[in-house]
Image (cartoon, rainbow, N blue to C red):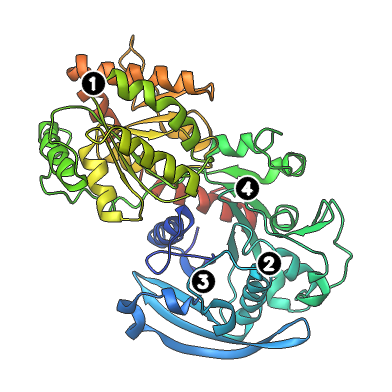
């Protein structure tokens, strides 16, 4: 891979500007890791005016502006830019589409991201920065390969672009009425078939990308296999099986600089006894009695996808039988939030629930708790289990997707392991695994510390993933891996 290789990373969100989940984390860390490997990397993201951090406002400059034909209307498109950590960012500005309190969840999201994708295509020629690789992410940018094929095919410089689509979560597909082909994109219906962009009578942005992109990736090897099955394929398993020859599973990492433990009492794998002081600090912060008992933790969106209903069904017997505490941090479905609050009322000295997003408290939880609960129904990759392991907080996970790829289950005979896992997605099974983990931490502290050290030694930065993406880009551009 040469320094001349140019990559444009197109995403609906990117830290440090905006983040609602793992996509924002990846959109910060992966471009930086690619840049460190010698690639010329740009990132294009919407300019959500109300969410853009004040500390970066002074660095923004206006690059250009033009209009984009969105159906019958001509929509203003400004392009702002700034450079951060060697990465140039392009921010697509339109007050009507992106001047809102939230990133997503609006009735016109289809139109908003149709505009965003056409704006990207039209920006490239105007700013004279056409990439070799256009790296797309999730449904918000997945329709771009169709636009390059059907709308902008006449631009000669675009004919050399190779497209990669990363699927971060197959559940979100961007499905809209086919009227958008004319009313937004102004293209014909020649691609509206089940081998193209049609899915159950609707236009699917994600399916369009799966069928039209030059390569597909998922954020873990196991998830790449799982989504080819009816159980995890979200209705697209047959389409993905047909494209399996160009589907790569590349495991995410975490930005280890951002998640370097910054706690009141620093510790390392050689000084794990100091974690007790962080546990006491955590207990004081969340309002639990300061006691030398195992602390279980949840840092998550409180949704069924994250296995929260399963956890709620398994918790009561565990809390009754064990001298243990639980800290929950996150927001999500109101019914699940309420259910965790009921547990807090029933066990006020054992359960603390904080219904908010708080990165600082999350770090305190990773650094002060013993067992991290992540029983996801499905998990494309997951970052929280990696963060927990980095802090020596052992994860207990449902063995799916990236959780299967990253957490080595404890083996009582060999001593191997970096956490705990279970296969059968039932409350009784989770309850048994919780009991096993709690008995181990209470009765066999030396074994527990060995597992902690093994978890903390796990390599989890982005270097390996960036190298794999570099191989993929090389294959697309030159027909062979480096």
Q: Which label sits in the foreground, 4 or 3?
A: 4
Task: Point out the tag, 1 or 3, that comes first from the N-terminus.
Answer: 3
Helix, strand, or loop for circle 1? helix
Spatial separation of the CA atoms under disc 1 and disc 3: 45 Å
CB within 8 Å, label 3 to label 2: no
Q: Is residue 267 visible?
A: yes
User: x, y (%) of residue 270?
Assistant: 13, 32
User: x, y (%) of residue 236?
Assistant: 73, 44
CB within 8 Å, label 4 to label 3: no
Horizontal side of residue 383 vs 211, given as left or right? left
Q: Quadrant of residue 391?
A: top left
* Residue at the image position 41 percent from the left and 63 percent from the top: 35
Spatial separation of the CA atoms under disc 4 and disc 2: 19 Å
Spatial separation of the CA atoms under disc 1 and disc 4: 36 Å
- Label 4 crowd (10 A; few <14 / some 14-19 / many >=20): some
Residue behind mark 3: 45
Task: Point out the tag, 4 or 3, that comes first from the N-terminus.
Answer: 3
Spatial separation of the CA atoms under disc 1 and disc 2: 51 Å
Q: Which label sits in the foreground, 4 or 2?
A: 4
Residue 130: mark in rendering: none
CB within 8 Å, label 1 to label 2: no
Residue behind mark 1: 441
User: x, y (%) of residue 48?
Assistant: 48, 75
| 157 vs 88, nearest the viewer | 88
Residue at the right extreme, as displayed: 190
* Residue at the image position 31 percent from the left and 25 percent from the top: 319
Residue behind mark 2: 144
Q: Is residue 83 above or below residue 400?
A: below
Q: Quadrant of residue 302?
A: top left
Residue behind mark 4: 171
Spatial separation of the CA atoms under disc 3 and disc 2: 14 Å
Task: Point out the tag, 1 or 2, that comes first from the N-terminus.
Answer: 2
């Amino acid at each position: 891979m040469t320094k001349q290789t140019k990559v444009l990373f197109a995403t609906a969100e990117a830290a440090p500007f905006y983040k609602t989940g793992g996509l924002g984390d990846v959109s910060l860390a992966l471009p930086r890791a690619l840049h460190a490997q010698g690639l010329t990397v740009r990132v294009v993201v919407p300019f959500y005016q109300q969410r853009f951090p004040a500390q970066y406002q002074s660095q923004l400059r206006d690059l250009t502006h033009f209009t984009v034909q969105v159906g019958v209307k001509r929509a203003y498109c400004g392009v702002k830019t700034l450079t951060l950590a060697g990465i140039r960012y392009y921010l697509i500005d339109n007050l009507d589409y992106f001047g809102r309190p939230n990133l997503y969840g609006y009735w016109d999201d289809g139109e908003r991201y149709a505009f965003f994708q056409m704006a990207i295509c039209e920006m490239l020629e105007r700013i004279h920065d056409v990439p070799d690789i256009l790296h797309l992410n999730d449904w918000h940018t997945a329709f771009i390969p169709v636009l390059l094929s059907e709308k902008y095919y006449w631009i000669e410089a675009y004919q050399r672009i190779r497209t990669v689509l990363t699927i971060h979560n197959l559940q979100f597909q961007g499905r809209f009425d086919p009227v958008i082909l004319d009313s937004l994109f102004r293209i014909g219906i020649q691609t509206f078939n089940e081998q193209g962009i049609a899915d159950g009578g609707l236009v699917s942005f994600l399916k369009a990308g799966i069928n039209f992109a030059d390569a597909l990736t998922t954020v873990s090897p196991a998830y790449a296999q799982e989504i080819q099955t009816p159980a995890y394929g979200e209705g697209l398993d047959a389409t993905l099986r047909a494209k399996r020859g160009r589907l790569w599973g590349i495991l995410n990492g975490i930005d280890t600089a951002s998640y370097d433990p910054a706690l009141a009492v620093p510790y390392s794998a050689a000084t794990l006894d100091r974690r007790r002081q962080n546990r006491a600090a955590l207990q004081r912060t969340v309002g639990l009695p300061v006691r030398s008992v195992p602390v279980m933790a949840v840092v998550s969106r409180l949704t069924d996808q994250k296995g929260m209903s399963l956890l709620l069904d398994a918790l009561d017997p565990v809390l009754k039988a064990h001298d243990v505490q639980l800290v929950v941090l996150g927001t999500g479905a109101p019914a699940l939030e309420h259910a965790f609050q009921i547990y807090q009322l029933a066990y006020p000295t054992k359960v603390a629930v904080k219904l908010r997003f708080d990165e600082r408290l999350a770090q305190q939880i990773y650094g002060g708790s013993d067992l991290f609960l992540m029983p996801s129904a499905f998990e494309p990759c997951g970052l929280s289990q990696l963060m927990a392991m980095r802090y020596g907080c052992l994860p207990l996970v449902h063995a799916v997707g990236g959780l299967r790829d990253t957490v080595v289950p404890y083996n009582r005979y060999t001593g191997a392991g970096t956490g705990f896992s279970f296969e059968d997605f039932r409350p009784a099974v989770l309850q048994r695994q919780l009991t096993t983990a709690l008995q181990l931490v209470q009765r066999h502290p030396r074994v527990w510390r060995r597992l902690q050290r093994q978890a903390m030694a796990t390599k989890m930065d982005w270097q390996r993933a960036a190298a794999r993406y570099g191989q993929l880009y090389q294959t697309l551009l030159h027909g062979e891996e480096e």
